[in-house]
Image (cartoon, rainbow, N blue to C red):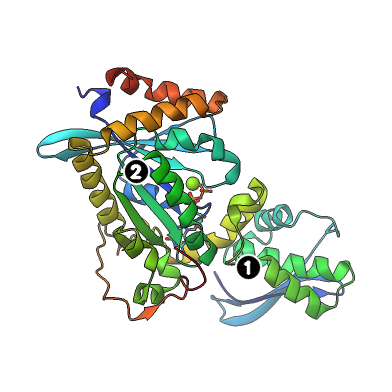
Amino acid sequence: MYSVMKCGVKLQPRCLVVTYVEMATKKLRCRQMPLRNFKETSNISQYAEELKKNQRHRTLLSDISQLQLEKMLLVVQGHMKGLSLEESVEQAESDLTIDPDKDLNKLETEQVDKAKRIMDETFNQHRIKADDPEFEYNVEVEFQQPIESSGWDSDDEF
Amino acid sequence: MSKPEDKLKIICLGDSAVGKSKMVERFLMDGYKPQQLSTYALTLFDYETKINGKMVPIEFWDTAGQERFASMHPSYYHQAQACILVFDATRKITYKNLTNWYRELRKYRPNIPCLLVANKIDADLGVTQRSFQFGKKHSLPQYFVSAADGTNIVKLFRDTIKAAYAYKQNPTDYVDQVLAELGNFESGKLDENDEAIFKLTSKEDQAEEF
Ligand SMILES: Nc1nc2c(ncn2[C@@H]2O[C@H](COP(=O)(O)OP(=O)(O)OP(=O)(O)O)[C@@H](O)[C@H]2O)c(=O)[nH]1
Ligand SMILES: [Mg+2]
């Protein structure tokens, strides 16, 4: 059993670095996973999926979300394309955040699916499934009268 | 056996990715029968519930928000008895776009009950303390829900079913309804998917002798 502490990347040689505690020995360990055949043009989500399936690494990587892996890979790819590390991190972050002003109705299916995968991070964190002990089918919560304006009504003519 | 015209039709509307499908799935989790059409534009779910001691069949129309399906919208509205109109409490644009959804809804269904929903409150509980004018302006009841943790989902759907049932008993805009719907049939461009859906509802049309 492992408990993952941190996940990062190394650029020289390119690899994913995961620090974790090995529960049996209570020792802090670090594993480097070389990014074999990872190219400037590689499909990020496919590559991340394959990493997650890797025989040697999958137990450790099961604690790291697909999205986080994708972010690491994006950083590496940005760097391969000539961005500085800082720029590359910034770009990866903005690429994997949802712009609340972006109209998803107008995007291609592929981009909408990507947005939904990003949203799945929070959804899955907060999800209470039927087999969770605290699950209740009917959850009714009454909220108090609002105390402030959403600010979403100001600039228009509803 | 219930007749097809006894069926209540409830539509879920709103932008892409506001969580309409997740909400329906959360409500129906106990043994639903999805009836997938050969298109991503629409998923139909059959449900049955007891109202006043009678089993009433219900059809949920889980529609897709993406713009490329706009030509199908008339079929969504056709004969619907209630609407669940959803925005994403974490994305302002989906709230802004309510205006368009609502305008279109009222063009086809001037008087059916419409329930307004702010979904994803789990992502930002603070939204439940904020006021949104859209519901007040159009006199729509507003619900704060989360498809993720289940907050108020069952209440929302039960209230919608009640509203749809009440409307069906007493559709005040019956004449408008018929006229508007005849209009749609003539003017709408039909593609194959649309036709499939019209066929699906054609029994009801005959029953009402258009
Ligand atoms: N945090 C949170 N996320 C949610 C909730 N409901 C849905 N989501 C997220 O939003 C994404 C989109 O939800 P869908 O149900 O597919 O959205 P939709 O309205 O059916 O979208 P279209 O079918 O494209 O019109 C999901 O993949 C989830 O990650 C919720 O209650 N809370
Ligand atoms: Mg959907």
Which residue is rendered at x = 28% and y = 54% of the image? B156
Which residue is rendered at x = 26% and y = 25% of the image? B5
- Ligand 1 under 8 Å from disc 1 Cβ: no
In the rendered structure, the answer to whether residue B201 lies left or right of residue B152 reads right
Identify which amino acid the numbered label 2 is placed on: Pro
Q: Position of residue B93 (x, y in %)?
A: 54, 63
Which sits in the foreground, B142 or B20? Answer: B142
Which sits in the foreground, B129 or A83? Answer: B129
Q: Position of residue A84 (x, y in %)?
A: 85, 78
**SS at circle 1:** loop
Q: Nearer the viewer, mark 1 or mark 2?
A: 2
Which sits in the foreground, B153 or A37? Answer: B153
- Density class for disc 1 (Cα within 10 Å; few <14, some 14-19, many ≥20) is few
Provide the chain ID for the residue under circle 1. Answer: A
Kindly indicate whether the residues beneath marks 1 and 2 are on one polypeptide chain: no
**In which quadrant of the rendered image does the C terminus of chain A lie?**
bottom left
- Density class for disc 2 (Cα within 10 Å; few <14, some 14-19, many ≥20) is some
Q: Which residue is mark 1?
A: A97
Residue B91 visible (yes or no)? no
Q: Position of residue A97 (x, y in %)?
A: 63, 68
Q: Position of residue A22 (x, y in %)?
A: 58, 75
Residue B205 visible (yes or no)? yes
**In which quadrant of the rendered image does the N terminus of chain A lie?**
bottom right
Identify which amino acid the numbered label 1 is placed on: Thr
Provide the chain ID for the residue under circle 2. Answer: B
Q: Is residue B145 above or below residue B187?
A: below
Q: Which residue is mark 2?
A: B110
